Image (tube, grey):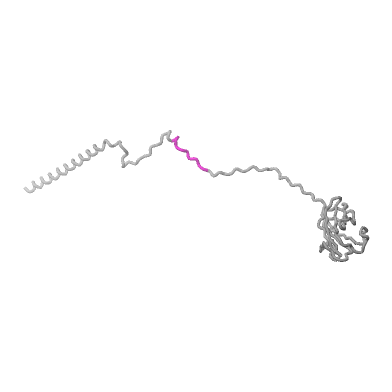
Amino acid sequence: MSSNATSRTGCKERLVVASSIATILALVVAVLAWLAPFADVGPSPFRRQQETPLSKQEELSKPELIPSFASTPSPQPTDSSMPSMAKPTTIGPSFGEIRFCLEEQLNRTARLCEISQDTFIGQIECVYMSWTYSNVEKGMRVSRNWYWNEQLICTRVHKWERDWQTEGVSEYTWLEAKGVEALGNPQYFPSGSYAVELYIGDRLEQRSNFVIQR
């Protein structure tokens, strides 16, 4: 009795399991049948979505990427011709500053009045004058005019004797009162306003004035 009961119980248990499996399979089939109409609606969430290749028309319509290059300035044309050379300016002969002084104020070596005066006071027997020069060639005609109160009292015309390139840039001379016939060859210069004009050829180069007061 006991063995038969056990046999039935085991057989009943196997039938229950088989029935359960059949029920689960039926449910799976039913679910799959229910999902079948939606298979073409969209991609499966478990399938990797692939990119759809562009059509030829779409490829042509895509914007073309043009690489950007830094603009390089184009070289400017240069003039290959030789630069025009400025013609040297020719400087003609000239006389410069005039100075007046007494004998003790004259530097005979430099041929220059070291101290210049425009007023002399007292009994003046001799007045020295110096002036600078440049580009004055030997043999050029030069002249000096001396005036007393705007009256011409002495003129000296001669040829230039010094070489400006080798013998300095200054020259001097003097005028003694007793050698001026227009003044009566006095021992001393009379009071008044004096002037000297320097010429190269016929061109006036310099004029300067001084005063003697007695």
- Residue sitting farthest toward the left: 1
Q: Is residue 173 magenta?
A: no
Instruction: Look at 74% across and 47% down and name the residue there.
Output: 86
The magenta span reads 59-68
Q: Is residue 168 visible?
A: no
Taking depth in this image into account, of 203 and 169 the one nearest to the observer is 203
Q: Is residue 74 visible?
A: yes
Q: Is residue 53 above or below residue 170?
A: above
Residue 95: x and y in percent read: 82, 55
- Residue sitting farthest toward the top: 57
Residue 178: x and y in percent read: 92, 62
Q: For the image shown, how many numbered marks are present on the structure?
A: 0
Taking depth in this image into account, of 109 and 146 the one nearest to the observer is 146
Q: Is residue 5 above or below residue 213?
A: above
Residue 20: x and y in percent read: 17, 43
Q: Is residue 61 magenta?
A: yes
Residue 129: x and y in percent read: 85, 60
Quadrant of the frame with the C terminus: bottom right
Q: Main secondary structure of the magenta part?
A: loop
In the displayed structure, does residue 178 sit left or right of residue 90?
right
In the displayed structure, does residue 62 sit left or right of residue 50?
right
Can you tell which quarter of the image residue 42 is in?
A: top left
Taking depth in this image into account, of 30 and 12 the one nearest to the observer is 30
